[in-house]
Amino acid sequence: MGPDAVTYNESIYVGYRYYDKAHVDVRFPFGYGLSYTSFAYSGLTLSRKVLAPGKAIEVLFTVENTGAMAGVETAQVYVAHRNSAAHQPVRTLAGFARVALKPGERKTVCVTLPPSALEFYDVARHAFVVEAGRYEVSVGRHSRCLLLHAAFTARGETVALPPAHSAGGPYGSFADNTFPDAAFAAIHTRPLPRNQKPVRGEYTQTTVLGDMLDSRTGRALHALALCAARLGMHFSNNPAVNRRVCEMTVRDLPFKNLVLNTSGIIRYPAAEALLALANGRLFSRGGTVRAERGRSRKG
């Protein structure tokens, strides 16, 4: 059972964006692949040295098959702002092209980068913008094998960001992935959700059965679901593995799935009644829910 809400404290720093910024060596870099042949890159040129607002830029380069076998290369284009006022990844994949080449063949590749390839979300403007300044374009086989480099200047926006979102803020540099709640709260600006196990009286259709064990009804439903899972599920020839998988499956099963998983045996009206009982409420003769009296009574 995990928390009801998950906060993405890492912000945009997942995958290669995290590993590059944290300077962590990886066995298989982003975009990595194997081939029966080899390729060489050369002749990088840009269609513009100065990029006006709203304009695209074409990245042209040559890829040559230098091996003895035909092959397909996925050439990748990355972009980085050299002196951004905002916290940014070291580089971002902006485009790629698959190139099929026979032995000794070479082709000129053109990857067009639209303005959106340079944009980031400006929290002060509440909009995606292209930040003015100097950008570097890098071309290569994967995120850690960039063979060609060129630069251009973008005429974009001058950004002024809150300290938490700036290059000098908590996400401007880091050495590991222990992004603290305080740092995330600073960029999130809204109160973080409290992750506390619901108590009897707070259960909803999305509450998992493992969180309803404070209720007699919840314990009974959990036991029945576990029995059904053990009879109907087979994941391994190892009985211990099967038991563990069944326990985890039922523990994390949302209450509403009792309807979805029983092929009509339990219908929504019955599920609503069971949920009311688990929450400590009873149905009157007229069908309405009334609060259960007596603190000593268990639902």
Image (cartoon, rainbow, N blue to C red):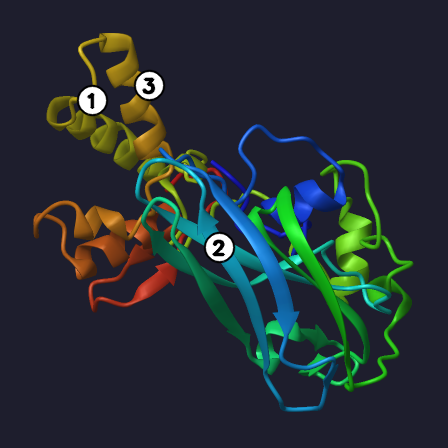
Tally of numbered tags: 3
Q: Residue 164 versus residue 33: which sits nearer the camera?
A: 33
Q: Quadrant of residue 220?
A: top left
Whether residues under marks 2 and 1 lie with C-beta atoms below 8 angstroms apart, the answer is no
Q: Is residue 116 above or below residue 142?
A: below
* Name of the residue lying farthest toward the left: 264
Mark found first going from the N terminus, 2 or 3? 2
Residue under label 2, please give it. Answer: 63
Q: Is residue 284 above or below residue 65?
A: below
What kind of element bears circle 2?
A: strand
Relative side of 179 to 74, left or right: right
Identity, as a three-letter code, of the amino acid under mark 3: Arg
Mark 2 or 1: the one toward you: 2
Q: Is residue 296 visible?
A: yes
Residue 287 picture location, percent across and down: 22, 66
Q: CA distance from mark 2 to mark 3?
A: 52 Å
Residue under label 1, please give it. Answer: 235
Identity, as a three-letter code, of the amino acid under mark 2: Val
Residue under label 3, please give it. Answer: 244
Q: Residues within 10 Å of mark 3 (few under 14, many from 20)?
A: few
Point out the image quarter for the C terminus: top left
Q: Quadrant of residue 239?
A: top left
